Image (spheres, grey):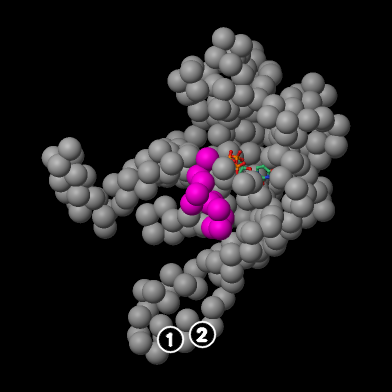
Amino acid sequence: MQIKKAVIPAAGFGTRMLPATKAIPKELLTVVDKPGIQYVIEEAVAAGVTEVLVITGRGKGDIDDHFDRMPELEQVLAAKGRTRELEAVLKPARLAAMHYIRQQQALGLGHAVYCAKAFVGREPFFVLLPDDLIDGGPPCVAELFAAAQEGESVIAVQEVPWQDTRKYGVVSIDEATGLVRGIVEKPEPHEAPSNLAVVGRYLLQPVVFSCLEQITTGAGGELQLTDALALMIKQGHKIRPCKFSGVRYDTGSPLGFLEANVGMALAREDMRESVRGMLLQLLRRG
Ligand code: UTP
């Protein structure tokens, strides 16, 4: 069996990236030379996904435009023989069957995922947060799929510095089974069950929707996906942690965004040498 559907929550306000995100959706900010959301959809497609639902909100309409055709521009590029640029314009429109739904109020990630209930139906599906870019290695969601045993959900995890646990969902692992035993959202370091943080890639079973119906407002006054996952575990559903191979960048804050741009440019063969030269020159300048 393969997973055909992916959900991309993109309805958040992106407050940490203001003022950049005042009029431009955070998900469309350019990392090296394309919008962050395109990387995660390419990752999902590389893992076999054919249907993508983006959870949008007010002011996010440009996301839809990015994955649409643009005949006038295509004609101009074709007439000028600019094949490379034409391919770049066509690619986002050809990636997958794109669907959009509005989360009418940004009530939290759990609420955003719940908006996908009708789209998902009764099969397992992926959730990819477009803030988290995972570079190098096989597609992260393909690794989650490979790790899953029948009926299990899988979440991507990564060790983070202890002082950063308050930024993440944090898991504890049952040593006997290797499964997630508990999960809490944004614990203070002294309360965190471990320093193993949840990264924005999930393979979820549809039972998550009935758990999302039962949770109440959690950390930050939001409906948290983490709380629904905790409820799934309590009800006896299995969630497996998966340490992935790629390098993860969190583009949701200015410094993380900068790191993603530099790191991902350095990882590209066509750019490495010039970026290194540029960085050395900047460092010399002090
Ligand atoms: P974040 O908390 O990282 O994104 O949510 P944010 O709320 O946009 O950013 P800040 O904290 O204000 O800077 C993780 C993901 O969940 C989506 C966001 O778009 C992001 O991709 N999200 C969050 C929703 O779709 N709806 C929500 O109500 C909340």
Contact check, label 2 and label 1, Cβ < 8 Å: yes
Q: Is residue 275 above or below residue 85?
A: above
The disc labelled 2 sits on which kind of residue? Glu
Mark 1: C-beta under 8 Å from nearest atom of ligand 1? no
The residue lying at 39 percent from left, 74 percent from top is 85
The answer to whether residue 244 is left or right of residue 216 is left
Q: What element carries label 2?
A: helix
Up/down of 93 relative to 12, above or below:
below
Q: Mark 1 points at which residue?
A: 76
Secondary structure of residue under mark 1: helix
What amino acid does circle 1 point to? Val
Q: In the displayed orientation, state which residue is furthest to the top.
A: 190
What span is colored magenta in the figure? 16-26
Q: Which residue ends up furthest to the bottom in the rendered image?
A: 79
Q: Distance between the residues labelled 2 and 1?
A: 6 Å
Residue at the disc numbered 2 = 72
Q: Position of residue 124 (x, y in %)?
A: 73, 44
